[in-house]
Image (cartoon, coloured by chain):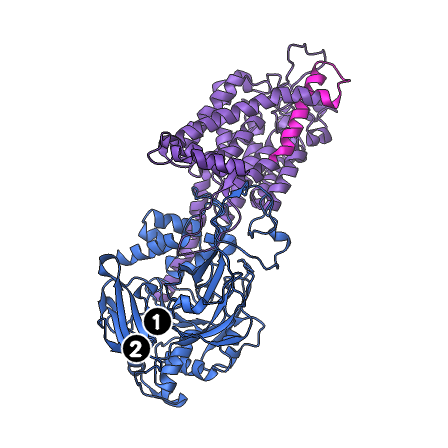
């Protein structure tokens, strides 16, 4: 299918990563954070402080979704299990070995993978640590292996600001990507849909056993939720799983190399990074090590993930499980005299209200800071959400249904079709400065509990 | 600005929790955020950068769009004054000064009363002062006739802000357009002062009206039972050109369709006002008037060519500035087409067939404000049905 999306908005930030792999960064400790996943309610810790683990050793599981084992990304000694509210295990800290030891899993050739049964593929993926690379919709959960997905969707490009270029990151990885596809084929009777940017000579075009779709347009054209909505929307009672090329690569490595190798190439980007480039890391690397000597001497904010959906982190934190980008932008905690009315060409706006002149130079790279640029206000329906959400969904009505805790209305208005990332641009352009992604998550949590 | 910042920081403790003026914090907050964009940063999770827009800037854009209508209104009040008193040699400056003398007090009263009530409610409820009134405070004077007594402006403003807005929870929650409510309140409470057909809406001061100056509005003439041929009665004074430019008696800001169009241009270019509502509003009025025009017989009002309807009275002003109020308008993009169209069509319908009141925009906007949620209901319901149909197709 060829899609051309008209709605949306590209945020062109300064400090994009140069297509250059600057080597591997290794930190002393690595973290695994159960809080990186949605709706984990009955955590069960499988290791004790002081235990030695290998890369691929189960360290944690959710009693609600028992078959899924979350595994250590590196080998070493579990030095801390930090607990938060209600003794929830927020973080596992592993002091990494110099030489990473891997749990051995069976190796397969490409054709062997195709001959495996669904149960064999499930078993391998569930016990090795690669499973959480899949996301189940609705609600964005770690998939329940008992729910057979209608289809599996993979977006092979990321349109978020500063996002890594998958064509660069996955060049030469075709073998693993294809192996990942072959494994995923066993999990669904439906199709594996892969979306690539329209008109490109993508490396993902060479994948076999998938349905390729070309999607054109500005952000959020790369969001898998938007793609699903246009290709085969999710209805009540259906499950669709999604993954990313990062997930395909790790799943592929499990079957080809027989180990859970959490290595990935991420981008360190943003206006406050001295020389934005790509780096090879392992899952859960410490932020301190990652940004060491690479940032300008300024007042900045480090974000794990992109600037629209990411999480603010400190140097004591680690990179999020599903994040493949560290963004560093200026912190905006300064007052600005008459900043609400003075004309500005620097600040970016989707709007063209008086004095907002950024529309004159839409292609210009911008340095944006974290200031709210205003205060929270009552909802004023300006019609602008619809212009950045290329879906047949009424965002304001859905949000109001959530605020009113009206489950039937949420369902009817399409809550099953969206995740936070799809509403992130709405949050960006919002005149009333609401936390729209948080509201949406609260709605999804409430709906699951009901 | 360093001085302002320091002063604000110095007096801040008195307005914070435990301070002497703790209760007045919303008022302090309003002034502080007026001077400075606060240093709030985005929360830990979610969008880490935000658009440069805020409600203040959006509201200011609407006010800027109203400035041409306001300035023209000031001139026109003076212009009409000298026409009525027979001083045809009055200079441009004389007209401006006379007009400003009449208009500015009304603006000041509207803002003083309205903002006073807004601050009171903000302090009482402990929430921040919303910017919505910045626009309403300018709309109210522009829909008042220049002869309006000041106390009526104050009473109408107070009524509208309290009954149309604050009882619903303030900005963003109101069902009716606040400025139109003020106008409607005056119309029904003090019809003697507000009926343009029987009253002269021209500021005369203490001077006498010269002979031969009627002072009626075009709508007044058209609605008059004795009028047989409206266009002939309009004469050259109410020519299409003069009605379009707006050098005729009427409410302060609404006489000039030209200025409203400039305002519409600003609203549409900036995206603050919905072009769908504005366009469909004018189309609705034109088609409705055209329909009446081609039907033979009927009253004199029906025989007015449709394009006259677009420039007479407050239609242009109402469609551009009142109908586009995002809070009280239809909220779905499809709904906006219906909403605007019906406002235009209803305005003409009321004009032509309501003998009691020759202008229909006020009632049309208020009526459609009430119906906007219903329009949205059907549009959203259609969206839900598409989803449901998909589900049924699968299960069937």
Q: Nearer the viewer, residue A264 or B82?
A: A264
For the N terminus of chain B, give its image quadrant.
top right
Q: Both on one chain, marks 2 and 1?
A: yes
Main secondary structure found in the magenta portion: helix
Q: How packed is label 1: few (under 14 Cα within 10 Å), some, or many (20 or more)?
A: many
Q: Which quadrant would residue B257 be assigned to in this image?
A: top right
Q: Nearer the viewer, residue A152 or B372?
A: A152
Q: Is residue A128 above or below residue A340?
A: below
Residue B232, image x and y in percent? 72, 24
Residue B19, image x and y in percent? 35, 32
Q: Under tag 2, what secondary structure?
A: strand
Look at the image and say whether residue B51 sits in the magenta stretch: no
Q: Which residue is mark 2?
A: A76
Q: Is residue B135 above or below residue A278?
A: above
Chain designation of label 2 = A
Q: Which quadrant would residue A39 be assigned to in this image?
A: bottom left
Q: Under tag 1, what secondary structure?
A: strand
Label pair 2/1, CB-CB below 8 angstroms: yes
Label disc, if present, on residue A30 of the rendered structure: 1
For the C terminus of chain B, give its image quadrant.
bottom left
Chain drawn blue, letter?
Answer: A
Residue A179, image x and y in percent? 41, 83
How far apart are labels 2 and 1 at the CA level? 9 Å
Q: Earlier in the sequence, mark 2 or mark 1?
A: 1
Chain B shade: purple
């Amino acid at each position: 299918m060829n899609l051309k999306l008209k709605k949306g908005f590209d945020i062109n930030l300064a400090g994009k990563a140069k297509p250059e792999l600057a080597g591997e960064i290794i930190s002393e400790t690595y973290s695994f954070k159960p809080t990186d996943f949605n709706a984990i309610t009955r955590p069960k810790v499988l290791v004790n402080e002081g235990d030695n683990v290998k890369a691929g050793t189960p360290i944690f599981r959710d009693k609600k979704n028992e078959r899924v084992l979350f595994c250590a990304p590196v080998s070493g000694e579990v030095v801390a299990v930090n607990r938060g509210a209600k003794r929830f295990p927020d973080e596992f800290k592993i002091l990494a070995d110099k030489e990473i030891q891997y749990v051995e899993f069976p190796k397969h050739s490409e054709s062997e993978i195709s001959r495996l049964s669904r149960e064999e593929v499930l078993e391998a993926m569930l016990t090795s640590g690669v499973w959480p690379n899949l996301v189940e919709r609705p609600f964005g959960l770690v998939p329940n292996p008992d729910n057979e997905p209608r289809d599996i969707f993979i977006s092979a490009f990321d349109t978020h600001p500063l996002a890594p270029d998958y064509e660069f990151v996955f060049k030469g990885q075709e073998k693993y990507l294809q192996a990942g596809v072959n494994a995923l084929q066993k999990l669904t009777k439906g199709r594996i849909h892969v979306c690539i940017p329209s008109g490109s000579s993508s490396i993902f075009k060479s994948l076999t056993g998938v349905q390729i779709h070309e999607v054109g347009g500005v952000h959020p054209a790369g969001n898998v939720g938007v793609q699903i909505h246009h290709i085969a929307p999710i209805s009540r009672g259906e499950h669709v799983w999604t993954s990313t090329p990062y997930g395909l690569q790790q799943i592929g490595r499990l079957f080809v190399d027989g180990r859970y190798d959490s290595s990935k190439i991420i981008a360190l980007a943003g206006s406050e990074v001295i020389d934005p480039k790509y780096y090879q890391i392992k899952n859960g690397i410490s932020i301190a090590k990652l940004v060491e000597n690479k940032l300008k001497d300024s007042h900045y904010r480090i974000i794990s993930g992109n600037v629209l959906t990411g999480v603010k982190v400190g140097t004591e934190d680690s990179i999020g499980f599903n994040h493949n980008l560290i963004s560093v932008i200026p912190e905006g905690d300064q007052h600005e005299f008459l900043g609400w009315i003075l004309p500005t060409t620097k600040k970016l706006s989707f709007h063209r209200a008086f004095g907002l002149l950024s529309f004159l130079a839409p292609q210009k790279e911008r340095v944006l800071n974290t200031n709210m640029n205003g205060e929270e206000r009552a909802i004023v329906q300006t019609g602008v959400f619809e212009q950045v959400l290329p879906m047949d969904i009424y965002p304001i009505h859905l949000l109001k249904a959530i605020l009113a805790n009206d489950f039937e209305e949420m369902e009817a208005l399409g809550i099953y079709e969206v995740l936070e990332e799809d509403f992130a641009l709405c949050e960006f352009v919002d005149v009333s400065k609401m936390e729209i992604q948080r509201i949406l998550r609260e709605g999804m949590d409430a709906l699951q509990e009901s | 600005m360093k001085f302002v910042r320091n002063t604000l920081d110095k007096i801040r403790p008195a307005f914070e929790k435990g301070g002497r003026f703790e209760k007045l914090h919303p008022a302090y907050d309003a002034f502080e955020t007026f001077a400075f964009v606060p240093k709030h940063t985005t929360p830990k999770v979610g969008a880490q950068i935000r658009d440069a827009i805020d409600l203040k800037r959006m509201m200011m854009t609407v006010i800027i769009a109203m400035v041409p209508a306001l300035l023209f209104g000031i001139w026109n009040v003076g212009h009409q004054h000298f026409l009525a008193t027979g001083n045809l040699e009055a200079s441009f400056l004389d007209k401006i000064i006379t007009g400003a003398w009449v208009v500015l007090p009304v603006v000041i009263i509207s803002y003083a009363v309205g903002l006073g009530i807004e601050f009171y409610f903000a302090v009482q409820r402990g929430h921040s002062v919303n910017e919505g009134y910045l626009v309403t405070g300018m709309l109210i004077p522009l829909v008042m006739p220049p002869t309006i007594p000041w106390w009526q402006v104050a009473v109408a403003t107070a009524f509208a802000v309290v009954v149309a807005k604050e009882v619903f929870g303030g900005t963003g929650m109101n069902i009716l357009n606040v400025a139109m409510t003020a106008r409607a309140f005056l119309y029904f409470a003090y019809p003697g002062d507000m009926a343009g057909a029987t009253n002269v809406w021209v500021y005369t001061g203490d001077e006498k009206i010269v002979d031969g100056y009627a002072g009626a509005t075009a709508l007044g003439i058209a609605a008059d039972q004795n009028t047989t041929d409206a266009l002939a009665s309009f004469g050259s004074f109410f020519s299409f050109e003069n009605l379009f430019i707006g050098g005729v008696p009427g409410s302060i800001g609404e006489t000039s369709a030209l200025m409203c169009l400039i305002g519409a241009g600003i609203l549409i270019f900036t995206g603050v006002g919905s072009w769908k509502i504005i366009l469909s509003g004018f189309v609705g009025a034109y088609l409705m008037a055209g329909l009446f025009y081609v039907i033979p017989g009927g009253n004199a009002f029906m025989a007015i060519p449709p394009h006259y309807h677009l420039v007479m009275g407050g239609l242009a002003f109402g469609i551009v500035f009142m109908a586009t109020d995002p809070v009280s308008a239809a909220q779905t993009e499809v709904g906006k087409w219906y909403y605007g169209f019906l406002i235009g069509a209803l305005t003409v319908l009321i004009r032509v067939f309501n003998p009691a009141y020759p202008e229909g925009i006020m009632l049309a906007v208020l009526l459609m404000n009430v119906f906007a949620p219903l329009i949205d209901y059907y549009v959203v319901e259609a969206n839900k049905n598409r989803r449901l149909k998909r589900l049924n197709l699968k299960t069937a």
